[in-house]
Amino acid sequence: MTHIMMTFLILILIPFFIFMIFIPYWTRKTESFGVSIPKEIYYTPKLKMMRNKYAKMMTFVSIVALLLLLFIYFFISKDEWVISITYSVIIVSYLLISFVIYLAFHRQMKQQKAEENWTRRKSQQIVIHTEFHKQKLTVSHWLYILPIIISFLTVLFTLLFYDRIPEQIPMHYNFSGEVTKLATKSYGNVLLLPFTQLFLIVMMLLINFVIAKSKQQVSAENPEKSMKRNVIFRRRWSIFTYITTIMLTLMFALLQTNMFFEIHQTVMMVLPLLITLIVIIGAVILSITTGQGGSRITFQTEKDDKVIDRDDDQYWKLGQFYFNKEDPTLFLEKRFGIGWTINWARPTAWLLLLMIILLAAGIPLLLS
Amino acid sequence: MYIHLDFESETPIYTQLVEQIIAGIAKKELLPGERLPSVRSLAADIGINLHTVNKAYQELRQRGFILIHRQRGVVINPDGTPSADEHYLQQLRETLHPLIAESICRGMSKVDFSKICEEIFHQYFEQEGEEE
């Protein structure tokens, strides 16, 4: 493990931590720690303080995690395997701890909502627009033909140049770019990379579908502005997803080309990390500028404070898991965080998740 | 058009849906031949049972406001809503009867009652002017 690699690992962690620290600032203004609230309550000193406290606690946890990683690297072991394990353990524990912290704030928020009658004398409504899904919400699904063609070309070239590929092919590298595992060449393991590439493209296309089809969530307080925000939110993430797909497809194509045409070794090591870094930083910037559901895009405000969104807290288990048997929706916006989640009461949504996991696990198993 | 649904109202959701779509047609926010979302899509956006939306659409179809095609989906009746016939007038009288009776009991005159009707009529035509 070199200093450069360590720097990269930390550079990837930092934007991820920033993302986690500021989640309460990125949610819709009608939600706070997984509890639905009238918009004006979001700006009260009490809630501001809660968000502030959450960010401080998460910052503390983030710093501890970074220090722990550095400590192990400098004082315990620079061994690749030790660092990989530490890195994974730190990320998993970080996610668990942040969820526990979230739960504490969620409970506090729920309690406050029960005590203070915010929704009194307000009509709770659901507003939808009949033309919502007819608007242009995402980049065309057809654009994904381009990465799919690149992927097919990768397969084609691999088969054409099959003879040029050495008998022993590297299956695993360490962080210094040394081969740690070799395998005898076969059509299966030679095609592992292109199949992973194709799987990723299909995944991204699925995300594009989710962005287009997910539930219309227009705020009752100000439907017109809210709809505009939501359309911008979906378009930006759809464009981001597409750019990411193109970058990843090209990266995989290059990694594969390396099998039959030698490419500079440093490029092969640095490129994947660099792309990961670009994607993560891009996601953070998009979150800051757009917010969940477009909540951070500001227009001149006009408000009608007699109407608020329907209180659907009963369907949000722990404030984060949507479970509504009546609702045929499969995908909808996350409550705490950025992006989309599923309706856990729909078996179709479960099946879809299961299929993705099986495919992700199955491709390497089948081919190697 | 925007559809506003009040989940705490005593009026059932499907009735609210029917009434708002009719109001949308009256205000010309929904035009003849215009497509409405499918049952599934509308139910998912609102977050209610498919059956509720289906019930509303079936009622609108029976009353001649919409057509439900197998391929083209749900559309606002391209020939426009059927004009008021004897059957409709009869129904209207029956609906108005108890309302007028109660208004009389509460001391309203014919003029008071007509004025409210006029105001409501006015709202529909006024909003049409604003939209365009």
Image (spheres, coloured by chain):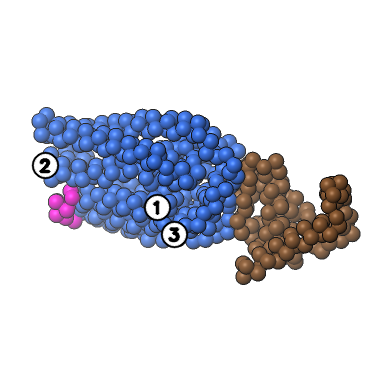
Few, some or many residues within 10 Å of mark 2 (<14, 14–19, 20+):
few
Please state the horizontal and vertical placement of residue B80, each as a whole percent of the image: 75, 65
**Lower sequence index among marks 2 and 1:** 2
1 and 3 marks on the same chain:
yes
Near-viewer residue (A72 or A58): A58
**With respect to residue A77, does B131 lie above or below?**
below
Near-viewer residue (A71 or A292): A292
Residue linked to disc 3: A299
Q: CA distance from mark 1 to mark 3?
A: 10 Å
Q: Which residues are magenta?
A: A261-270
Residue A245's label in the rendered image is none
Residue linked to disc 1: A296
Residue that appears at 86% across and 57% down: B110
**Lower sequence index among marks 2 and 3:** 2
**Mark 3: which amino acid?**
Phe
Residue linked to disc 2: A2
2 and 3 marks on the same chain:
yes
Query: Is the C-beta separation of discs 2 and 1 under 8 Å?
Result: no
Secondary structure mainly formed by the magenta segment: helix
Q: Chain of mark 3?
A: A
Left or right of A222: which side holds A4?
Answer: left
The blue one among the chains is A
**With respect to residue B25, does A117 lie above or below?**
above
Q: Colour of chain B?
A: brown
